[in-house]
Amino acid sequence: MNVETIIVGPIEVNCYVVSCKKTNQAAVIDPGDNADDILKVIRSRSFELKYILLTHGHFDHLGGVAPIKAATEAQVLMHKEDKVLAESAPAQAELFGLAAPQEFDVDRYIDDGDIVEFGNLSASVLATPGHTQGSVCYQFEKGVFVGDTLFYGGIGRTDLGGGDFEQLVHSIKSKLFVLPDDMKVFCGHGPTTTIGREKKYNPFVN
């Protein structure tokens, strides 16, 4: 598995391009903005983009979905509980004084335990409600992409619509902290961490 990080948008979302070294098939996780920059990486590596994987429905994580989908015909996957939230992305962006993202169609709604495969890679979907009700993580063999569920030394906000602090902590402990300590955690904002580090030091969960 190869992972390339592109920091996008004014809220500095970590967009990840995950690719299979043997087949050059790829998926992009949370293309929040700067679609041209993301597409430039995909084209420069000659990737065959199979999926656009969304961890949740906040506008800063999906602003680049429509143009990337149009350019590549990749399938968009997200959890159905964030359908309404994603549809309200233009209103969310307006609250921050930012440009509204283009509308897009979701090709498949995913749920806990689903498997997403491309190339020789396989990711398990982990439903982790709390930051939003439809928040999910994508667990590959050597890393888990957690969106805004867990951060280096922090957790996602729960003061927005659909947020629930106790639910988020339960999701982290029951779905993420059961993973191996050396599992890399690719966060939606900020630096990468590991499960072991957050189990030991994260003040919001311990």
Image (cartoon, rainbow, N blue to C red):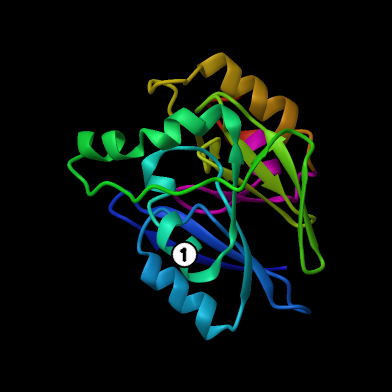
Q: In this view, does 184 lie above or below 161?
A: below
Q: Residue at x 39, y 65 (%)?
A: 35
Residue 17 in the figure: left or right of residue 89: right
The answer to which of 195 and 24 lies nearer the viewer is 24
Quarter of the picture holding the N terminus:
bottom right
Q: In this view, does 152 lie above or below 204?
A: below
Q: Residue at x 52, y 31 (%)?
A: 82
Q: In this view, does 142 lie above or below 160?
A: below
Q: Where is residue 191 in the image (x, y as percent from the top left)?
A: 50, 53
Q: In which quarter of the image is residue 161?
A: top left
Q: Where is residue 86 in the image (x, y as percent from the top left)?
A: 44, 37
Q: Where is residue 181 in the image (x, y as percent from the top left)?
A: 76, 44
Type of the residue with mark 1? Ala
Judged from this view, the residue extending furthest toward the left is 97
The residue that disc 1 covers is 70
The answer to which of 66 and 161 lies nearer the viewer is 66
Whether residue 82 appears in magenta in the rendering, the answer is no
Residue 92 in the figure: left or right of residue 57: left
Residue 175 in the figure: left or right of residue 29: right
The answer to which of 191 and 146 lies nearer the viewer is 146
Residue 4 in the figure: left or right of residue 114: left
Query: Does dot 1 land on a helix, a strand or a loop?
Result: helix
Q: Quadrant of residue 33?
A: bottom left
Mark 1 surroundings: few (<14), some (14-19) or many (≥20) residues within 10 A: few
Q: Residue at x 54, y 60 (%)?
A: 16
Q: In this view, does 200 lie above or below 70?
A: above
Quarter of the picture holding the C terminus:
top right
Which residues lie in the magenta part?
Answer: 180-199
Whether residue 196 appears in magenta in the rendering, the answer is yes
